């Protein structure tokens, strides 16, 4: 069920096994087990921890397509993955998504956004 799959995906995330996490997520979807915010967040976090920013963004697109709601945890993991991948523009876009979605900005997502700009040498954007 959803809780079992989400827990297994989360365990993969914690052990750095992003490929296995995505494989389980795929099995979950093919088995017609309902995906939710928690299962998407676990898969996105697995990608984020492993520097797979493009896969994290793809999962976020899937969330929108399947009308699964995202939250601050989702966007924080996405911003962090973009930071690690040197994609400061994407990180800034995601901060805008948060503002437009009325998700509260906090020190975690703002720090990740600023760090992404810093790493890209775009310090002016962080100000």
Image (cartoon, rainbow, N blue to C red):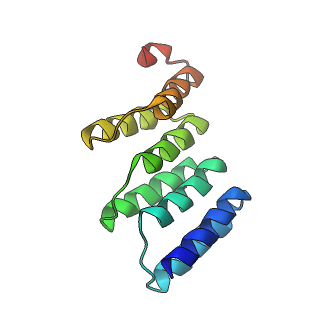
Q: Position of residue 92 (x, y in %)?
A: 40, 32
In the rendered image, residue 126, in percent from the top left (x then y), is placed at 45, 18
Image quarter in which the C terminus is found = top left
Specify the quadrant of the image occupied by residue 64: bottom left
The residue under the point 56% across, 75% down is: 5
In the current view of this chain or complex, which residue is farthest to the bottom?
Answer: 31
Q: Position of residue 76 (x, y in %)?
A: 48, 42
Q: Name above or below for residue 125 compared with residue 108.
A: above
Which residue is pictured at 45% across the width and 50% down the height? 74
Q: Residue at x 62, y 63 (%)?
A: 10
Total number of numbered labels?
A: 0
The answer to whether 84 is drawn above or below residue 44 in the figure is above
State which quadrant residue 14 falls in: bottom right
Depth check: 107 or 66 in front? 107
Q: Residue at x 49, y 86 (%)?
A: 31
Depth check, front residue: 11 or 92: 11
Q: Work out whether 99 lies above or below 40.
A: above
Give the image location of residue 13, x and y in percent.
65, 59
**Above-or-below relation of 44 to 9:** above
Side of 101 where 46 appears, left or right: right
């Amino acid at each position: 069920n959803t809780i079992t799959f989400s827990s297994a995906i989360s365990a993969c995330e914690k052990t750095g096994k992003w490929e296995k996490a995505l494989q389980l997520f795929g099995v979950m979807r093919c088995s017609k087990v309902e995906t939710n915010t928690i299962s998407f967040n676990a898969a996105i976090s697995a990608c984020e921890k492993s520097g797979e920013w493009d896969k994290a963004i793809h999962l976020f697109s899937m969330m929108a397509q399947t009308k699964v709601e995202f939250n601050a945890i989702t966007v924080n993991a996405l911003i962090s993955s973009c930071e690690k991948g040197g994609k400061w523009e994407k990180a800034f876009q995601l901060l805008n998504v948060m503002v437009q979605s009325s998700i509260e900005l906090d020190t975690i997502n703002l720090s990740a956004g600023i760090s992404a700009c810093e790493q890209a040498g775009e310090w002016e954007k962080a100000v």
